Amino acid sequence: MKILIAGDSFSADWSKKYPTCAGWPNVLANNYQITNLSQAGCSEYKIYLQLTSVDLTLYDAIIVSHTSPYRWYVKDHPVHSRDQLHNASDLIYNDVAAHLPVMLELEPIVIFFEKYFDLEYANFVHNLICAKIETLIPDTVRVMHIQNFDSAGMHQFKHVMDFYPIFQSHPGLINHYSDRGNKIVADRLAHWLDTPN
């Protein structure tokens, strides 16, 4: 089966930076032909761009890992643009605030998040992009949307797996899961892939 994976760090190929570690996308690649477009730290808009960059009808199934609504799109990240895993990152408050003490040029970004960033607007835009993503995928292609965070108030996908409880109980370095967490995610997705419609 030809499988397309799009999404954020929960689905990115972490073996680019940690070659000896296998996250759930790498586990799936042992049994399926995987094309993984996911980018660590990216916003929902970049996930949309991942999906528009390829012909979706060429795949038997598509897995989309959705991200936090609080990531702000930028073309070049001021901290991570040279990092081999996070070079496509977008801005999120905790990340830029953590780097502020050593990178004073981040202060205007931190001020933006603290004084001007509007959570209601961010949720609204995120939901619009999620709805647009759902309409992109042809009815002839199987799709599973996966969520790794509390999705209360977020767009409700027709086909979704909620891995937030797995993330809470099995956190780790690779794809933010422990080895056990990555195995659970891989097994559940493999079961879905192997179950006929």
Image: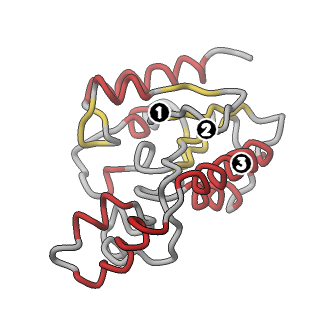
**Residue at left 74%, top 45%?**
131
| Front-lying residue, 36 or 164 | 164
Residue at left offset 30%, top offset 34%: 177
- Residue picked out by circle 1: 150
Say which residue label 3 marks: 133
Could you tell which of marks 3 and 1 lies nearer the N-terminus? 3
Q: Amino acid at mark 3?
A: Ile
Q: Is residue 109 above or below residue 130?
A: below
Quadrant of the frame with the N terminus: top right
Q: Residues within 10 Å of mark 1 (few under 14, many from 20)?
A: few
Give the residue furthest to the bottom.
Answer: 105
Q: Is residue 28 left or right of residue 136?
A: left
Residue closest to the eye, 18 or 185 = 185
Amino acid type, residue under disc 1 in the picture? Asp
* Secondary structure beneath label 1: loop
Which residue lies under the disc numbered 2?
A: 154
- Asked if the residue at tag 1 contacts the one at tag 3, i.e. Cβ–Cβ closer than 8 Å, the answer is no
x and y, in percent, of residue 65 in the image: 53, 41
Who comes first in sequence, dot 3 or dot 2? 3
Where 88 falls versus 124 (above or below)? Answer: below
User: Residue 68, percent across and down?
Assistant: 48, 48
Question: Which quadrant of the structure image shows residue 197?
Answer: top right
> Where does residue 188 sit, x and y in percent of width and height?
48, 20
